[in-house]
């Protein structure tokens, strides 16, 4: 009897890979963040990446990070987590797990909590000491949302036929 293949990727590797692949759809020249929402039984429910709302042209709205507020991307961009939540068409996200390539900001934390997502797996936390991230952790802790950092395996994902 032949045994199953060894070396297959874990659920965390799989879903973080989907989140990171989703982030590659972002047209933001500085930050490509992706998110993947998964059910308790490991089914993909939704995905998202950072970008402008539907109908707002990627060529007409600004991508700048500095300058006058209305000439910056910040008032217009929808973050990957919120996009994934808004893209979901199946009802409740209660008990779901969110994989995201960057730790959620305070605005996304509010949406995550309100949507009922119970666990966040994040890859990077480069804004750990920023007030928005501190506020995010404070709210997530108060609401009982579990979060942990993805443990990279160093494995190179290659497509083999």
Image: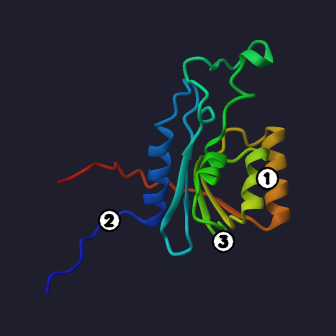
Residue 53 is left or right of residue 114, and the answer is: left
Q: Residues within 10 Å of mark 1 (few under 14, many from 20)?
A: some
Say which quarter of the image contains residue 113: bottom right
Of 138 and 82, the residue lying toward us: 82
| Mark nearer the N terminus (3 vs 1) | 3
**Which SS class for mark 1?**
helix
- Residue occupying image coordinates x 82% and y 65%: 143
Q: CA distance from mark 1 to mark 2?
A: 35 Å
Of 133 and 156, the residue lying toward us: 133
- Residue occupying image coordinates x 71% and y 19%: 72
Position of residue 114 relative to residue 66, above or below, is below
Check residue 133 in the rendering and tell me which mark sits there, or answer none: none
Say which quarter of the image contains residue 142: bottom right
Residue 2: x %, y % from top left: 15, 81
**Residue pointed to by mark 2:** 8
- For this orientation, the residue located farthest to the front is 55
**Which SS class for mark 2?**
loop
Q: CA distance from mark 3 to mark 1?
A: 15 Å
- For this orientation, the residue located farthest to the top is 67
Q: Residues within 10 Å of mark 2 (few under 14, many from 20)?
A: few
Q: Of tags 1 and 2, which is closer to the observer? A: 1
**Residue pointed to by mark 3:** 95
Q: Residues within 10 Å of mark 3 (few under 14, many from 20)?
A: some
Position of residue 145 relative to residue 110, above or below, is below
Of 82 and 128, the residue lying toward us: 82
Check residue 110 in the rendering and tell me which mark sits there, or answer none: 1
Q: Is residue 34 visible?
A: no
């Amino acid at each position: 009897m032949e045994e199953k293949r060894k070396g297959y990727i874990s659920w965390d590797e799989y879903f973080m890979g989907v989140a990171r692949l989703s982030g590659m759809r972002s047209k933001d020249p500085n930050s490509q963040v992706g998110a993947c929402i998964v059910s308790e039984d490991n089914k993909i429910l939704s995905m998202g990446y950072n970008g402008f709302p539907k109908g707002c042209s990627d060529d007409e709205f600004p991508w700048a990070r500095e300058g006058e507020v209305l000439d910056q991307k910040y008032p217009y961009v929808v973050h990957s987590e919120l996009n994934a939540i808004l893209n979901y068409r199946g009802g409740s996200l209660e008990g779901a797990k969110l994989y995201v390539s960057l730790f959620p900001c305070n605005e996304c934390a509010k949406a995550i909590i309100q949507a009922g997502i119970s666990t966040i797996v994040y890859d990077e936390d480069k804004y750990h000491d920023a007030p928005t991230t501190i506020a995010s952790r404070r709210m997530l802790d108060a609401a009982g949302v579990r979060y942990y950092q993805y443990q990279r395996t160093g494995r190179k994902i290659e497509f083999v036929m």
